[in-house]
Image: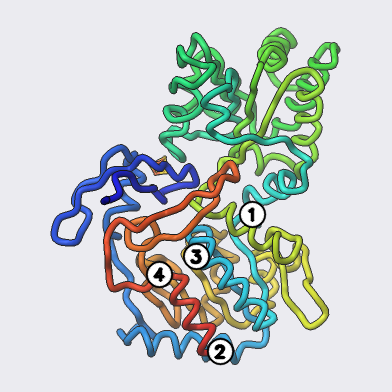
Amino acid sequence: MEQEYYVCTGCALLCDDIEIEVNEGKISKVNNACLKGVARLKECEKPAECRVDGNNVSMDEAIKEAAGILKNAEKPLIFGMGNSTTGAQKKAIGIAKKLNAYIDDTSSFCQGPVIEAILGDRIKTCTLEEVKDYGDVTVYWGADPSNSHPRHLSKYTYFPRGKERQRGWEEDRTAICIDVRKSDTAIICADKFYQIPPQADEELIDALIAALSGKVPKVSFGMGPKKILELANMLKKAKFGTICVGLGLIYSLPDVEPLVRLMEKLNEVSNFHLIPMVGQFNMRGFDHNLHDETGYINRAKFGENGVEHGPQCSVVELLRTKSVDAALVIGSDPMSSLPGCIAKELSGIPVVTIDPCVTMTSAKAKVSIASATTGSDSGGTAIRMDGVEIDIEPMITTDSLSDEEILNRIMEAL
Ligand code: SF4
C-alpha cells in the first residue's frame, strides 16, 4: 500500500503528517506543512551540481577529488551534518576516525550545552507527545516558534487536544513567552508575555528561584516583584510544565548552570521538563551519535591516543587560529552562519561540500558534490528535538545519491 503520510525535514519538529501530490516524478503539492516545510520539500531554488574549481564534473570525479583533498590534509575538519540522516552522520564520524580529523557541528555554537546536560541526566526532559497529552504550562524562553518551528504550538503545546487536555488553549493550557522583543509568539501569548532587556535572563532566573523559595524577588530592570511572583506562581501550579529553550536564552547565559539551577528548583516545587528548540532537522541526532562514539556531543578530534575534546576543537576556534588545512562540510552553510571574520578563513583552505542546494559555502568550495534532499528524495532516521527517533521515507525516486551514499563512496576512495 502506498504511504499516505510523510515526514517534513524543514526543522527538528519533524512533522509526520505531511501529504504530497506527485506529478511527472516531482512533488507538485505539499499539504499540512508550514511554508518553511514546503520550501524545504519542493526543489531547491538553485540545485547544486558536482563541480571542481567551478567546472562541472561527474559524480565519480568529484568524489575522487574530494577523497584526494581529505587524504592529503594533515589536519582536516568535518563539519555540519545537522541536515543529514543518522546513517550519514555515522559515516561522517567513521571518516573522521579514519583520518584522525576534527569533527564539529552547529550545536557547538547553539543548543549544544543544553543537549549535553540532557544526555548527562542533569536536566529533566519529556517527549512532545507527553506535552500534547498532559502539558498545561509551556514557557517559550528566548524562542519564537511561530517563525522558527511554525507548527510547534498547534501540534503540541498550546492549541491541540490531548488525553488530559481536551479543551485546548486558554482553558486547559497556558503559554508563556519570555523574550527581549515582542515576537510573533509573544503576541500569541498576549498578557503572558514577559519582556526583559538583553542579557537579563540569568538575573530573571535567579529572581524566579528566589520567588519559588518564598523570598521577595528583585531584579535591576523594570519588572516589579509582583510580576515576577505572578510568573513564579504559574510555574509552581503547573501539573506538567515545559520550558522550550531558544537561542535567545542560550546566547545570553554564560553556560548551562543557571538553567540547571532553575530546573532543580522547579522540580522541587512543581513538575517541569525542558526541550531544546533545535533548528536543523537532525542536529540533535549528530550530538547523540558522536556522544555514543566518544562521550562528547561535538568539538572532538580523533587521534592515535584517543579523542581530544574542548573549545580548541570547535569550528570557530579552528578557523580563527588557522588550525585546519581542509574541510568537509556536509549539509551546512558556515559561510553564512559563522561571523564573517571567522568564515573568511574557509576561503584559505580547500573545502569540499555535500549539499542538495547551492549555498554561499558550496559556491566557493573547491569541490561541490550534489546530494539528494533528505525527506523528499532520500530517507533514513533522525532524532527529533525532544530526542525521539523518527523514520523518514523518501517521497519520490531520483537518481541523486543520498549524503550517506556519497560518504560511503568517499570512505571507499580514502
Ligand atoms: Fe516542517 Fe518544521 Fe514546518 Fe513541521 S514545523 S512542517 S517540520 S518546517
Q: Is residue 179 above or below residue 72?
A: above
Disc 2 designates what residue?
Answer: 414
Which residue is found at the position 69% from the left and 64% from the top? 314
Which residue is found at the position 14% from the left and 60% from the top? 24
Identify the colour scheme used.
rainbow
Disc 3 designates what residue?
Answer: 335
Disc 1 designates what residue?
Answer: 109
Among the two numbered marks 3 and 4 on one chain, the one whose residue lies closer to the N terminus: 3
* Quarter of the C terminus within the rendering: bottom right
Which residue is found at the position 30% from the left and 49% from the top? 3
Q: Residues within 10 Å of mark 3 (few under 14, many from 20)?
A: many
Q: CA distance from mark 2 to mark 3?
A: 26 Å
Q: CA distance from mark 1 to mark 4?
A: 27 Å
Residue 402 is marked as: 4
Residue 180 drawn at (x, y percent): 58, 30
**Mark 1 vs 4: CB contact within 8 A:** no
Question: Residue placed farthest to the left in the image?
Answer: 24
**Mark 4 vs 2: CB contact within 8 A:** no
Q: CA distance from mark 2 to mark 1?
A: 30 Å
Q: CA distance from mark 1 to mark 3?
A: 14 Å
Is residue 40 visible in the rendered image? The answer is: yes
Q: Amino acid at mark 3?
A: Met
From the viewer's side, name the closer residue of 331 and 341. Answer: 331
Query: On the rendered structure, is 65 left or right of 348?
Result: left
Residue 348 drawn at (x, y percent): 55, 80
Q: Amino acid at mark 2?
A: Leu
Q: Nearer the viewer, mark 2 or mark 1?
A: 2
Which residue is found at the position 52% from the left and 12% from the top? 172
Q: Nearer the viewer, mark 2 or mark 3?
A: 2
Among the two numbered marks 2 and 1 on one chain, the one whose residue lies closer to the N terminus: 1
Among the two numbered marks 1 and 4 on one chain, the one whose residue lies closer to the N terminus: 1
